[in-house]
Structures are given as structure tokens and as C-alpha cells.
Amino acid sequence: MLNPKETPTPLRVIAVTNQKGGVGKTTTAINLGTALAAVGKNAVILDLDPQGNASTGLGITHAQRQRSLYHVLIDRLPLAEAMIATAIPRLSIVPSSFDLSGAEMELSGVSRRSFRLRDALVTVNQAPSSHSPIDYVLIDCPPSLNLLTINALAAADAVLVPLQCEFFALEGLSQLIRTIELVKSSLNPKLEIQGIVLTMYDRRNKLSDQVADDVREHLGQKVYQTVIPRNVRISEAPSHGKPALLYDHKCAGSRAYIQLAGELIQRERALRAM
């Protein structure tokens, strides 16, 4: 069981990423953030995808995005000044904006262009502000390997990979692992794969079982025991500007994300004990 009164832990930055789109990356970021907040952790989601789906999925209107990650990366706006409280207690977001789509070109000629996000995170729990100390930062990355994703990987302590239970899952995963290893060797020596979570799992489909077995055979303990089922309530929730846990906390998808948060915290506890 999770204990909301656990001793505060050092800030952990986790990049939620997969170069392939449509794998449940944003859904995982917002629902995992919600689940962490529900068990007493202070969490912030960084919406690094110019499409801004994480912001929309948490009910953040375009009018509220006057300060976004674009301003953090380009203008060096302090991260705390761009945070917006969500409807979920203890969960905040730094939203995306349309300007973020041009950030890569604007960053191309600046110094430390791969480390702008890392630099912004350094003082997020040190600067005087009204927010409580943050336990987890979840970065919702774009579905591509570009300078924004590189910034996320250079800033992160670990990577969480949502992996759809489909035929080409392992092929795409091998490419992502090579990218992570490249970033680790050149930009961020501490970067590790925190875990791989199987998404859109359909018990009625033998292919889902086959993919799950193949991934576990190749990556063993890196794969979470929790699997996220294909669930219509998860799909409906973003259109209401709510995470699934707020839209329908009793549905199978919501229960799975609560279990995933528990498993993530257990893994983090084990890492700190090493």
C-alpha cells in the first residue's frame, strides 16, 4: 500500500517518451501524474509536445497558456513562474503553446541548446515560491527525436517508455533504446530506463499476450507488472479536459494507473536504497 505520509523524497525527473506516436504517452503522463498526486506526491507535468495534448487533457485553455515551456526554454523564464495548478490537488503543469513548434529553430544557435530544460530545473525547488517542494516532474515528450526530446533526455533522471501492444513494438523500442544510450554517453551519464509500461492491452487479442511475452523476455525486470488496458473511458476523458482518474476513477484504466504509480514509487524507493 502507498502511504501519503511518506518522508519527502528528492526531486525526480522522468521523461515519458516514445518516438512512435499513438502509444498512450500523453495519457500515461497525465494519469500517472494524477495518481502520484492522489497518493500525496507533489507532481508537475511539463508539456513539451507542441500539440499541447497534455495541457488540453488537464483542462488548460489556450487563454491560460500565456506563459509556457516555450518561454522557459527561449526566454529563460523561471519554471515556477510558468506553472499552472490543475483541478487535481498537488498536480501542476507547465503548458505547451503553439510557439513551441518553432523553438527548435530558435534554439539552434544558442549556447547549451541541449541543456536549456536541465538548467531550468536546477533551481525549481530552491527559488522562493508559493508551491510546495516537487517530488516528481513528468516530461511529456514529442513523438519524435528532435531538440525538444533531447532537452528532456538531457534533463531527466530516468525514462518511462509507454509501449503499445502491437506487432512492431519491439522494433521501435530497440531504436529508442539506442537513442537513450547515445544521450547517456554524450549528454547525461545518469540517464536510465526507469521502466517500460505496456499500454492498450487487449486480453481478447492473442497478439497482446504475444507482444507482452516478447517484451518481458527481452527486457525482464525493466517491464512493469502493471499493464494499461484498452479502455473506452480512458479515450473519452481528454475530450472532457480531465484525466481518466477524475473522469471515472472506477474504470479499469484508472485502477491500472493507480497500480502503476504504486509500482513506480516502489521502484524509486529501491533505487534510493542501492
Image (cartoon, grey):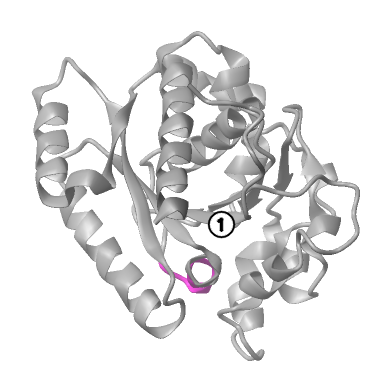
Q: Is 39 drawn above or below residue 9 in the view shown?
A: above
Q: Is 253 drawn above or below residue 143 in the view shown?
A: above
Answer with left or right where residue 169 lies relative to residue 231. Answer: left
Q: Measuring from the top left, give residue 165's x and y in whole percent.
A: 22, 35
Magenta stretch holds residue 35:
no
Q: Is 179 drawn above or below residue 247 in the view shown?
A: below
Q: Measuring from the top left, give residue 117's x and y in whole percent.
A: 64, 70
Magenta range: 145-150
Task: Name the residue carrying label 1.
Answer: 13
Amino acid type at circle 1 is Val
**SS for dot 1:** strand
Which residue is depicted at the point 68% across and 53% down?
96
Which residue is depicted at the point 66% across and 89% down?
110
Magenta stretch holds residue 148:
yes
Which residue is depicted at the point 37% across and 63% down?
192
Query: Closer to the camera, 163 or 225?
Result: 225
Magenta part, dominant SS: helix
Q: Measuring from the top left, give residue 49's x and y in whole percent.
A: 57, 55
Answer with left or right where residue 69 lies relative to residue 10. Answer: right
Q: Measuring from the top left, give residue 242's x and y in whole percent.
A: 64, 25
